[in-house]
Amino acid sequence: MRFTDTDTGTLFLNFMMIDIHLLGYLAKFSPTKQEKFKLELPEETTVSQVLKEIEFPVDLEKVVLVNGRHADGSTRLADGDEIFVFVPAAGG
């Protein structure tokens, strides 16, 4: 949610806390170098914005789940959401 103070014109943002899991070797892209970490971001941040914020490589093939459901870059996040990022499995 965004609102502007009408007296000063200052823009205020509400923030949310999300849990991020970068599984397996993807943990090397974590700011904490751990598979699981928390991130505070403005409300309605998208998955793409989160990945950009943590400098996750754009060209790296990945699967993203938000709260256990497949998500794409345009998926908007909410406070308490849990994001899992992992490499797609291949088999034969």
Image: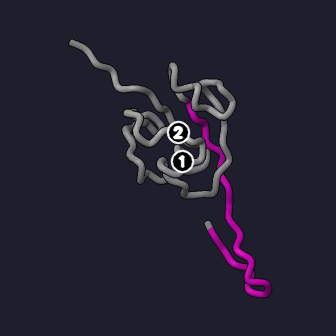
The residue depicted at 66 percent of the width and 34 percent of the height is: 31
Q: Is residue 19 magenta?
A: yes
| Front residue of 55 and 63 | 55
In the displayed structure, does residue 25 sit left or right of residue 72? right
Magenta span of residues:
2-21
Task: Report which quarter residue 69 is drawn in.
Answer: top left
Please identify the dominant SS of the magenta region: strand
Q: Position of residue 20 (x, y in %)?
A: 58, 35
Residue 51 versus residue 6 in the image, above or below: above
Say which mark, if any, is on residue 71: none
In the displayed structure, does residue 32 sit left or right of residue 24? right
Q: Position of residue 44 (x, y in %)?
A: 54, 58
Task: Report which quarter residue 91 is drawn in.
Answer: top left
- The residue tagged 2 is 56
Task: Label 2: state its secondary structure.
Answer: loop
Disc 1 marks a residue whose amino acid type is: Lys
Question: Quarter holding the N terminus?
Answer: bottom right
In the image as oriented, which residue stretches furthest toward the left?
92
- The residue tagged 1 is 52
The residue depicted at 48 percent of the width and 38 percent of the height is: 57
The residue depicted at 61 percent of the width and 32 percent of the height is: 30
Task: Label 1: state its secondary structure.
Answer: helix
User: Badges 1 and 2: C-beta atoms under 8 Å apart?
Assistant: yes
